Image: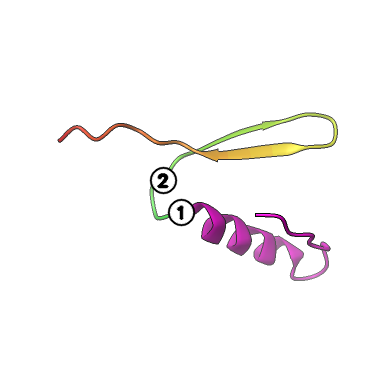
Amino acid sequence: MDKLLKLDKTGDSRLLKEIKKSLGLKLDDELFLFSGKDYLVIKKVQRPSMI
């Protein structure tokens, strides 16, 4: 996903919506986050199925 978002009054909710949509997030999914001075990396945790 390459998208430029401007944080305004609705920026926080738009940012969350874009992240959830891009990663296909569902309730109880886990995320791994790490950041530096001017970046943030968000990765969906993929756990192996126990079935």
Q: Quadrant of residue 18?
A: bottom right
| Horizontal and vertical percent position of residue 10 | 74, 70
Q: Residues within 10 Å of mark 2 (few under 14, many from 20)?
A: few
Residue under label 1, please give it: 25
Residue 16 in the image: above or below residue 51 = below
Q: Bounds of the magenta span?
A: 1-25
What residue do we see at 84% from left, 30% from top?
A: 37
Q: Quadrant of residue 38?
A: top right
Residue 38 in the image: above or below residue 14 = above
Label 2 element class: loop
Label 1 element class: loop
Q: Is residue 32 a member of the stretch shown in magenta?
A: no
- Figure quadrant of the C terminus: top left
Q: Amino acid at mark 1?
A: Leu
The outermost residue toward the left is 51
Q: Amino acid at mark 2?
A: Asp
Residue under label 2, please give it: 29
| Horizontal and vertical percent position of residue 50 | 19, 32
